[in-house]
Image (spheres, coloured by chain):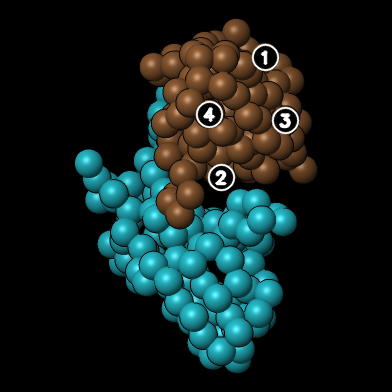
Chain colours: A cyan, B brown
Amino acid sequence: DARVTQTPRHKVTEMGQEVTMRCQPILGHNTVFWYRQTMMQGLELLAYFRNRAPLDDSGMPKDRFSAEMPDATLATLKIQPSEPRDSAVYFCASGLVEWVQGQGDYGYTFGSGTRLTVV
Amino acid sequence: EDQVTQSPEALRLQEGESSSLNCSYTVSGLRGLFWYRQDPGKGPEFLFTLYSAGEEKEKERLKATLTKKESFLHITAPKPEDSATYLCAVQARNAGGTSYGKLTFGQGTILTVHP
């Protein structure tokens, strides 16, 4: 089965350090999402891309977070500087979004996540 | 703003005891309603997408239904391996009738099935 690959799986870092998380979406998928999951907030959308172009990043703290897709096989989420409140599991998901009404928009495939701990 | 509320927060069942999970939503034009299963330490796993009121989908012991205000995930004769967190999400239709694709998730229902 095709899968979304995220690295690293776990990251422990000190406050103030830069953190970069990577995601390899499924080949052929045109939409990539970044979600953050915490016990308190559940799954929150941070940013997403369609055909590598950013569509919405309103869920991200702009001063410290940035998301990019340098090519179709790689999406990155960067935090600089990191803070303890950024501790969470970060998920990447990809999918194929069709524009024909009533068709497509199949379920998105999530990666296994990056568990980030900022101390 | 799109909102999704799932109930109950946690559900404990005995093996074979059927039940239902609820997902209530408010969205400015529903494009699709998604159900996911999440096991501890893993990412959400796609189960179903429902597009219109009255639609039903089944997969093994699970059946999802949709009305204009809520969706139910019915679990028939559950087994311990059905224990997981079940997440519901909505996708809104934009002004042009298509969708930008983003999902808004509920907090999930933690299901525990005892043998």
Q: Earlier in the sequence, mark 3 or mark 1?
A: 3
Q: CA distance from mark 4 to mark 3?
A: 20 Å
Q: For this rendering, which residue is in front, A90 or A66? A: A90
Q: Earlier in the sequence, mark 3 or mark 2?
A: 3
Which image quadrant for residue A53?
bottom left
Q: The C terminus of chain A is located in which quarter? A: bottom right
Q: Nearer the viewer, mark 3 or mark 1?
A: 3
Q: The N terminus of chain A is located in which quarter? A: top left
Q: CA distance from mark 3 to mark 1?
A: 16 Å
Tag 2: residue type? Lys
Q: Earlier in the sequence, mark 2 or mark 4?
A: 2
Q: CA distance from mark 2 to mark 1?
A: 21 Å
Residue behind mark 2:
B102
Please indicate whether residue A40 sits to the left or right of residue B83 in the image: right
Callouts 2 and 1 in the same chain = yes
Secondary element at tag 3: strand
Q: What is the number of callouts on the image?
A: 4
Which label is found at residue B67?
A: 1
Residue behind mark 3:
B7
Q: Nearer the viewer, mark 2 or mark 1?
A: 1
Query: Would you place residue A70 above or below residue A44 in this image?
Result: below
Residue behind mark 4:
B114
Query: Would you place residue A31 above or below residue B74 in this image?
Result: below
